[in-house]
Amino acid sequence: MVLADGRRAGTLDPDVGEFPGQAEQPSLRLRGGSGGLFHYGIELHLSQLPPQGPLTLVTECRIPARPAIDSR
C-alpha cells in the first residue's frame, strides 16, 4: 500500500514491535480471507489512519511458470 505522503506498508514487511500504531512507519497485516478458484476476498489492517490524499493498493499475482503480474 502506498500512502499519499509516500510512505509504504506491505504484508511482507517485518513487524515493528508490540504497538505498531505508535511507530512512525505504518504496518499492513493480513487478518483473514476466503474464496474459491476464481475469486478471493481478504481482510487487511493498516496500523495507522492514512493521511488525506490518494491511497494506492498494489497487488501481485503469481502463476507458476509465468512472470509476476503487478496490478495497481
Image: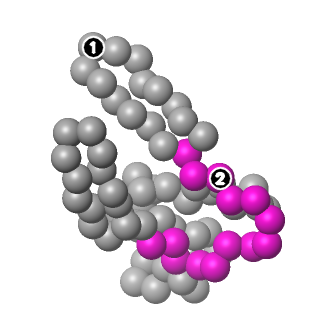
Residue placed under numbered mark 2 in the picture: 56
State the count of labels: 2
Closer to the camera in the image, 12 or 18: 12
Closer to the camera in the image, 17 or 71: 71
- Seen at 52% across and 31% down, the residue is 70
Residue placed under numbered mark 1 in the picture: 65
State the separation of the CA atoms marked 2 and 1: 28 Å
How packed mark 2 is, by other alpha carbons closer than 10 Å (few <14, some 14-19, many 20 or more), is few
Image position of 45 with respect to 19: above or below: above
Element on which disc 2 rests = loop
Image position of 58 with respect to 31: above or below: above
**Residue 51 got which mark?**
none
The reply to whether callout 2 and callout 1 are in contact (CB within 8 Å) is: no
Residue 4: image x %, image y %? 77, 61
Give the residues drawn in magenta, as a range: 45-58
- Seen at 27% across and 61% down, the residue is 33
Outermost residue on the left side: it is 36
Image side of residue 34 versus residue 13, left or right = left
Would you say residue 16 is visible in this rendering? no
Element on which disc 1 rests = loop
Image position of 61 with respect to 45: above or below: above
Image position of 65 with respect to 49: above or below: above
> Which quadrant of the structure image shows residue 2?
bottom right
Residue 35: image x %, image y %? 23, 53
- Seen at 42% across and 24% down, the residue is 68
